[in-house]
Image (spheres, helix red, strand yellow):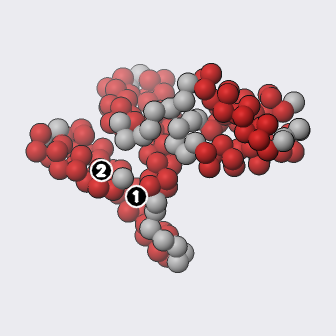
Amino acid sequence: MREILAQALKDALRAQDKRRVSTLRLIQAAIQDRDIANRGAGKDPVSDDDILAILGKMVKQREESAKAFEEGSRLELAEQERDEIAIIRGFLPVQLSEDDMKRACQQVISEIGADGLRDMGRCMNALKEKFPGKMDFGKASGIVKTMLQ
């Protein structure tokens, strides 16, 4: 994943795409920050799954910022955030559709043998393990909760 991001940055620099260059540098800075934090805690550098989680978090942050900018009538800043979201999403795996998410949740519930809300944590951990970066776990949590009630 690091090599893909590095190559994308080189390509953006050659193309003189300022928005893409700045966004890719932000991504690399976030990864480097996590590497430094892990090193301080005696852990390994971030893995590809961790990078996908970082990218997902960056998308979520930008969505919240874009919404706040729109509410504040700062449409040019909201558009800038949306441009960054599009660039970051280009490195994320394709997200599962709503129906696929429901099927995945149902499958995990039956695999684990969950029969109540007390099994919700186990279900969510299994989903995060099986589908890293491929679904919105906030929505998945609501789906699992509904199915377990």
10 Å neighbourhood of mark 1: few (<14), some, or many (≥20)? many
| Number of the front mark, 2 or 1 | 2
**Image position of 4 (left or right of 118):** left
Q: Residue at x 29, y 55 (%)?
A: 3
In front of the other: 144 or 107: 107
Residue 91 is tagged as none
**Image position of 140 (left or right of 135):** right
Q: Which residue is mark 1?
A: 31
The percent position of residue 14, horizontal first and vertical second, equals 10, 45
The percent position of residue 27, horizontal first and vertical second, equals 36, 50
Rendered image quadrant of residue 35: bottom left
Determine whether 41 is above or below 109 in the image: below
In front of the other: 81 or 46: 46
Q: Residue at x 61, y 45 (%)?
A: 130
Q: Residue at x 84, y 41 (%)?
A: 114
**Image position of 102 (left or right of 18):** right
The percent position of residue 101, horizontal first and vertical second, equals 63, 29
Q: Looking at the picture, which amino acid does disc 2 mark?
A: Leu
Q: Which residue is mark 2?
A: 5
Q: Looking at the picture, which amino acid does disc 1 mark?
A: Ile
Q: Earlier in the sequence, mark 2 or mark 1?
A: 2
Label 1 secondary element: helix
Q: Is residue 77 visible?
A: no
Label 2 secondary element: helix
Q: Quote the CA–CA distance across marks 2 and 1.
A: 11 Å
Residues at discs 2 and 1 in contact (Cβ within 8 Å): yes
Q: Residue at x 64, y 36 (%)?
A: 138
In front of the other: 97 or 59: 97
10 Å neighbourhood of mark 2: few (<14), some, or many (≥20)? some
The percent position of residue 113, horizontal first and vertical second, equals 84, 41
Determine whether 136 is above or below 38 in the image: above
